[in-house]
């Protein structure tokens, strides 16, 4: 017996030719669709992502092979997609081998698919084919349960103003088309085995073998070869249909998302893109499609509507008119309309902009309210399994709004204050170090004396009355520990982290210039700050302007002091606490363990909230939100977070490590009616207690 | 519709104010300056009208502390021309300032002159009326909101008792603006920087201001004594807040 199978079994010559003709036409259509996609990206500006191609490729390959981003916080989907993905890849490679063998190698006298190779080939494809079907069924089952991620309701438009049924149709077609392609493939195998009267080596196709017996049991063995032909064509039409459908549908992610992962910037959102000299002359932000970089245009296509960002977003959760998913999808619709429509299943939108000849991207396509709702907490970027950088698009569009003066009065006042006095409080810059007056020692002026650590204090820690006492505690503890540290006094200005995220790039650049000049005057070895926002921009963004500093968070410094014995803890604290990871500390800069280690050293019992570390939930203050009106929100993110902490039960303190968090959560405990149930404390409050 | 807007820099009240040795003026050495808030409203109203009716907006100021910054900011917001009047020494009176402005304006093509109703520095409120006097054209002051109808302006004034008045005035006229219809716009730093590079600062001589004497002068400047019946709460923010709460409780308000 010869172990192989006949390609085009029972096929007359004419039908074979017909198949090849249709096949070529389909592939041509597919290639044309793919070419159009590439052409669209070529309209974008350079993104500066062609460096380190090898490393980028290997990293993306690893992520894809392991499904690490997909499995994060959702094992079920991770497993299901892994099965579908690897099933698809193996079946695709199998098909390529068949084509190679039949269409090319045959004419060179080589025949791969026979003997042992054929047997292992059969087994391999069967196993992965089963995985493929199981994965698809798992996804279908999940869809039937309607998880919140897959709810296409938009938070920014009333029901009836838009129609997303095409999305649902696409989801269904994609899933079931793949499923039936897989199923008919197995059927063809079973029918072939019955038709060939069970060649014994075909047990190496176990699924086909079992199906053959099942078909027999149904009494279909006599008609097996006739049914085979029909099933074969049904299978073939579905496969060709899928190939044609691929560049115009949800399936496009097969083409785009590896590249999107590969070209993702590791510092995306942490370091926002500069505005080019040229752009500065014509209004900072994005006005037309060709203002976007090709990576940003690719972002719009990469979205699979998985909804992870939609669920993670604090703005969406609080009833603000923003969903990062919907923002990306709206931009996709816009880019499709502008660059020539390829998408077969587009959302129908009747909010007006599609009828306008030249709709404003920031204003019409994406509403100003939507853009201003973002807290820049980066949960969307962190949650996205395929490397979409929502935040760069949001900030670039905000830049347009700022240029047009399209913002709340309160925000405008703050920007003017920062421009005039270098702080958001609108107080004289000469009062910046006033909080130090109550100390019984003088903090060194780093401009006049050499110090080991320069403390970049920041606006809230300097000017907010509630936080000044925290700043004084930090100062006192460091002084007692004999740390050589100093501040910049009135020369320090707002570091600009949030100014940049508001979209006021000109003001940001001015602040960077002034602050770098002040830092230039001072002599120090390292910088530390209590403010994660300041930490982020100093560490990730100032280097692009030539400011290279070693920057630490105070929790890191405090641990070093305890470990080296410079700080002697006198007692263990017996509180039960929960710790809130500030977005700019945990998610932005990966500093999640040091504050916990510090709490552990203090002896407190730490209960984790469900959303912790890089999955922390924003307090709602970032990206300038702290200066905007939050009275229209259904529920403030900070209040939701306090309730998340209270749900843990028996927690005494809500521990923060960020000045803005202290302000936000002290308020939230009161406004949510939970005063007395939970005390908001800074880590330094606990440390002070343990030291005395 | 060509509008000339007169602006002025005034001491920034965010800083602690000190008197100089004469006791008749502020110690200006350490002061910071910013645009007089009412002038900012005047500029905003002019820019809104330009957006509605076309024409030009010219920002004009007497030379002085940080005035270039203010004029460039006006250009960045949308003023087409910026004019600096030079040649007046020291701190001119409003009479002299008005004469200088009138000298500069008289040769220009304009339909209206806007300026802030008063400045925090002198609470005088006389500049608009004096400019109108020297130019020999009508004047309305304490205006909040302007509409242009042909060669007339319809202006709104807030009277006492919550009444609004609508007045018609022939153009050209001088309007002392109390408030623009919208909050004065924010001008991004990038635009100011651009304006500094691309805007031509015109300089005009103040001309003859003789005979425009003020007729009054500041005899003394001082910080008022705390009046009777007012109790100043001293202490830290927390202590003050506690005292406020206990007073409110005492009075049965909360």
Image (tube, coloured by chain):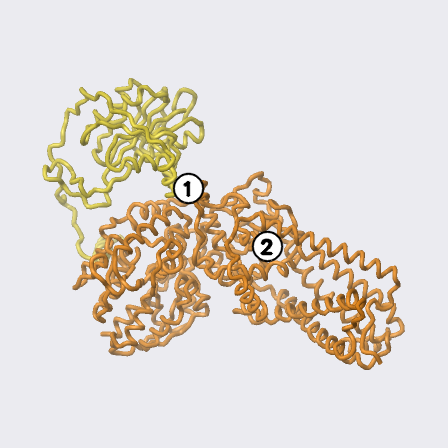
Q: Nearer the viewer, mark 1 or mark 2?
A: 2
Residue A466 x/y as whole percent: 28, 59
Q: Which residue is mark 1?
A: A405
Q: Is residue A49 left or right of residue A246?
A: left
Residue A511 x/y as whole percent: 33, 50
Residue A165 x/y as whole percent: 64, 54
Residue A540 x/y as whole percent: 40, 59
Same chain for mark 1 and mark 2? The answer is: yes
SS category of the residue bearing label 2: helix
In the figure, B81 relative to A455: above or below?
Answer: above
Letter of the orange chain:
A
Letter of the yellow chain:
B
Quadrant, the C terminus of chain A: bottom left
Q: Is residue A667 visible to the viewer in this orientation of the structure?
A: no
Q: Answer few, some or many: residues within 10 Å of disc 2's Cα (few below 14, many 20 plus, some between 14 and 19).
A: many
Residue at coordinates 51% horizontally, 63% vertically from top-left? A383
Q: Is residue B210 left or right of residue A308?
A: left
Quadrant, the N terminus of chain A: bottom right
Q: Answer few, some or many: residues within 10 Å of disc 1's Cα (few below 14, many 20 plus, some between 14 and 19).
A: some
In the figure, B103 relative to B79: above or below?
Answer: above
Q: Which residue is mark 2?
A: A301
Among numbered discs 1 and 2, the one appearing first in the sequence: 2
SS category of the residue bearing label 1: loop
């Amino acid at each position: 017996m010869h172990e192989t199978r006949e390609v085009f079994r029972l096929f007359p010559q004419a039908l074979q030719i017909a198949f090849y003709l249709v096949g070529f036409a389909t592939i041509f259509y597919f290639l044309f669709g793919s070419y159009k996609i590439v052409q669209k990206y070529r309209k974008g500006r350079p993104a500066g992502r062609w460096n380190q191609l090898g490393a980028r490729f290997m990293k993306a390959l690893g992520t894809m092979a392991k499904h690490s981003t997909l499995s994060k916080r959702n094992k079920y989907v991770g497993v299901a997609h892994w099965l579908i993905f690897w099933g698809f890849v193996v079946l695709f490679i199998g098909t390529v081998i068949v084509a190679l063998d039949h269409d090319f190698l045959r004419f060179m006298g080589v025949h791969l698919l026979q003997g042992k190779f054929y047997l292992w080939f059969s087994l391999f494809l069967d196993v992965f084919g089963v995985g493929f079907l199981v994965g698809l069924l798992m996804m279908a089952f999940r869809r039937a349960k309607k998880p919140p991620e897959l709810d296409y309701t938009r938070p920014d438009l009333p029901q009836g103003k838009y129609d997303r049924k095409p999305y649902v149709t696409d989801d269904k077609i994609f899933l079931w088309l793949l499923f039936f392609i897989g199923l008919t493939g197995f059927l063809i195998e079973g029918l072939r085995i019955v038709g060939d009267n069970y060649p014994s080596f075909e047990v190496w196709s176990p699924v086909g073998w079992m199906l053959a017996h099942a078909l027999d049991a149904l009494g279909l063995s006599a008609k097996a070869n006739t049914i085979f032909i029909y099933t074969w064509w049904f299978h073939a039409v579905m496969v060709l249909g899928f190939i044609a459908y691929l560049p115009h549908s949800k399936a496009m992610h097969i083409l785009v998302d590896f590249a999107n992962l590969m070209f993702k910037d590791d510092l995306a959102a942490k370091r926002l893109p500069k505005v080019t000299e040229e752009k500065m002359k014509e209004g900072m932000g994005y006005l037309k499609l060709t203002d976007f970089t090709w990576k940003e245009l690719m972002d719009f296509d990469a979205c699979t509507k998985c909804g992870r960002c939609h669920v993670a977003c604090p703005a969406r959760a609080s009833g603000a008119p923003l969903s990062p998913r919907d923002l990306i999808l709206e931009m996709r619709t816009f880019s499709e309309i502008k660059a020539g429509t390829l998408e077969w299943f587009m959302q129908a939108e009747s909010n007006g902009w599609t009828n306008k000849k030249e709709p404003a991207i920031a204003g019409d396509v994406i509403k100003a309210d939507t853009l201003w709702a973002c807290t820049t907490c980066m949960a969307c970027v962190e949650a996205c399994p395929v490397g979409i950088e929502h935040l760069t698009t949001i900030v670039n569009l905000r830049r347009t709004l700022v240029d047009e003066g399209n913002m709340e009065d309160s925000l405008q006042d703050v920007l003017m204050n920062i421009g005039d006095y270098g702080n958001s409080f609108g107080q004289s810059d000469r009062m910046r170090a006033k909080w130090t007056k109550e100390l019984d020692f003088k903090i060194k002026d780093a401009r006049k004396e050499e110090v080991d650590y320069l403390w970049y204090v920041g606006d809230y820690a300097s000017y907010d009355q509630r936080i000044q006492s925290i700043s004084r505690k930090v100062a006192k503890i460091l002084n007692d520990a004999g740390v050589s540290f100093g501040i910049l006094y009135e020369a320090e200005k707002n570091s600009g982290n949030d100014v940049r995220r508001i979209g006021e790039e000109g003001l940001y650049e001015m602040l960077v210039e002034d602050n770098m000049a002040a830092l230039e005057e001072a002599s120090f070895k390292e910088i530390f700050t209590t403010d994660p926002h300041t930490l982020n921009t100093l560490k990730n963004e100032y280097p692009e302007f030539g400011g290279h500093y070693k920057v630490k968070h105070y929790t890191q410094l405090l641990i070093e002091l305890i470990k080296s014995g410079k700080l002697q803890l006198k007692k263990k604290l017996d509180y039960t606490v929960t710790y809130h990871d500030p977005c700019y500390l945990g998610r932005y800069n990966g500093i999640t363990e040091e504050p916990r280690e510090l709490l552990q050293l203090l002896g407190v019992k730490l209960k984790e909230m469900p959303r912790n570390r890089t999955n922390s939930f924003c307090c709602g203050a970032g990206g300038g939100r702290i200066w905007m009106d939050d009275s229209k929100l259904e529920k403030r993110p900070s209040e939701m977070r306090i309730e998340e902490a209270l749900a843990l039960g028996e927690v005494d303190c809500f521990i923060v490590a960020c000045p803005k968090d202290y302000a936000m959560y002290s308020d939230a405990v009161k406004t949510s009616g939970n005063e007395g149930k939970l005390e908001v404390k800074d880590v330094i409050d606990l440390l002070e207690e343990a030291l005395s | 519709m060509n509008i000339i807007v007169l602006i002025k820099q005034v001491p920034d009240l965010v800083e602690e104010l000190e008197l100089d040795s004469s006791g008749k003026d502020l110690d200006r050495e350490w002061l910071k300056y910013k645009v007089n808030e009412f002038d900012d409203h005047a500029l905003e109203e002019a820019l809104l009208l330009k957006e509605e009716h076309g024409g030009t907006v010219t920002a004009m100021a007497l030379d002085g502390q940080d005035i270039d910054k203010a004029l460039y900011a006006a250009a960045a917001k949308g003023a087409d021309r910026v004019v600096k009047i030079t040649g007046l020494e020291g701190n001119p009176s409003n009479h002299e300032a008005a004469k200088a402005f009138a000298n500069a304006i008289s040769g220009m093509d304009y339909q209206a002159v806007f300026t802030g109703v008063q400045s925090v520095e002198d609470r005088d409120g006389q500049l608009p009326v004096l400019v109108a006097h020297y130019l020999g054209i009508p004047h309305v002051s304490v205006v909040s909101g302007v509409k242009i109808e042909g060669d007339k302006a319809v202006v709104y004034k807030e009277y006492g008792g919550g009444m609004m008045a609508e007045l018609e005035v022939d153009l050209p006229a001088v309007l002392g603006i109390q408030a623009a219809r919208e909050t004065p716009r924010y001008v991004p730093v990038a635009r100011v920087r651009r304006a500094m590079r691309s805007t031509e600062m015109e300089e005009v001589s103040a001309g003859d201001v003789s005979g425009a004497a003020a007729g009054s002068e500041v005899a003394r400047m001082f910080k008022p004594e705390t009046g009777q019946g007012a109790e100043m709460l001293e202490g830290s923010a927390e202590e003050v807040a506690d005292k406020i709460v206990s007073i409110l409780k005492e009075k049965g308000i909360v």
